Image (cartoon, rainbow, N blue to C red):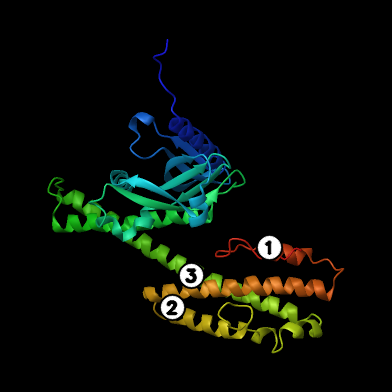
Amino acid sequence: MTQLPTYSINKMKGNKATDILKKILGQFSIVNPIDESVDLGIDMRAQIINNFKPEPLLFNIQCKGKDSLSTDCIKDGYFSVPIKLSTINYWRQQNDTTILFVVDNETENCYWCDPISQIGNNISKIQEQQSVTIHIPLSEYINSSYIQCPPNLIKCILLFMVNQIESINHNISNLKDGTLSSYPFDVETSVYLLKKINEGAQHISESYQTICETIVSSIRQQMYEAYDYAYQLETLDPVIVHKWCRDGVRKEKGFTANRKSLENLKMDSDNIIDAFLADKNNTDMLDALVDCDKEVEDLLNNIGAFLYEMACEDNPFGDNSKLYNKIWNHHWKYHKNHNDFSS
């Protein structure tokens, strides 16, 4: 019998990639494959797990396989993947974001990107196209070493959830204008909806306040830790410290990329926080807060590494493991990896 179905190379490649990705994602999420008979551009759905418990963080998955990295990919720093516009529009209809994965079947690295945010506000401009080219950076990937979901992937999920507010606002406007003629509501239903909208608005306002307070607290806490490191530096051999900080630790401008001293950054952060607390609804001040938080973390990151190096130089045979672990295990929001000062 020669008339038999063919298991194509592309099908084999795709199935291998799916198996690899499912195994890796399974280390920090619950993965549910989609029946191929109803596959419209989503291969799997996943829910993040934290401490063996499911989190309210879900995402859809489109998986594509590659035999290996091509020379062009390595040169450009990304994969270029054509996606049908109909698939993009389908992803935008979903309640959860869709993450596009390209799996290198040879190394089992799973490269990923957020195609919806990559397209952004250009969605209306591309509606006449048949397909869209999506870039998947080689810098974003997961493999078998990942036992927790990457922070950047969680960020994509959260941003999509927040952006859904625009869709909610659009539907509320439709209710207000009475444009949902195909869904007639009686007065009782309308009042119920208004109550829910009001409850939701109050919850959003409370969450906004909580997030703002968390950012302010983070800046203040990290500034406190930076001053504590400065104090510890000042207790070391002054000859060693003065070699690098001629004007004193608190006036040294080499700890930050923008050449701000500890004292200058403390003054700037206090001014930004005071201005924000005086007008919490000023969203421009939110951007200033985030920039300030990044600056303070950069300062803490560098002054901590400097403290460890100076402590080792001050007492080469002493036990500085406690200080090392404190700095190394710090939760860095913007630094993917702390400077390796262990050598």
Sequence-earlier tag: 2 or 3: 3
Q: Is residue 140 above or below residue 342?
A: above
The residue under the point 35% across, 34% down is: 39
| Secondary structure found at label 3 | helix
Distance between mark 3 and mark 1 Cα atoms: 26 Å
Nearer to the camera, 197 or 222? 222
The amino acid on which the numbered mark 1 sits, given as a three-letter code, is Trp
User: Is 325 placed left or right of 36 in the picture?
Assistant: right
Residue 136, labelled with which disc? none
Residue at image mark 3: 213
Q: Position of residue 109 (x, y in %)?
A: 55, 45
Residue at image mark 1: 328
The residue under the point 23% across, 54% down is: 171
Nearer to the camera, 135 or 268? 135
The residue under the point 58% across, 64% down is: 335
Please rate how many residues cluster around mark 2, counting C-alpha atoms within 10 Å: few if below 14, some from 14 to 19, many from 20: many
| Secondary structure found at label 1 | helix
The amino acid on which the numbered mark 2 sits, given as a three-letter code, is Phe
- For the residues bearing labels 3 and 1, Cβ distance under 8 angstroms: no
User: Is 232 placed left or right of 27 in the picture?
Assistant: right
Distance between mark 2 and mark 3 Cα atoms: 10 Å
Q: Position of residue 261 (x, y in %)?
A: 61, 84
The residue under the point 39% across, 30% down is: 35
**Residue 114 in view in this figure:** no
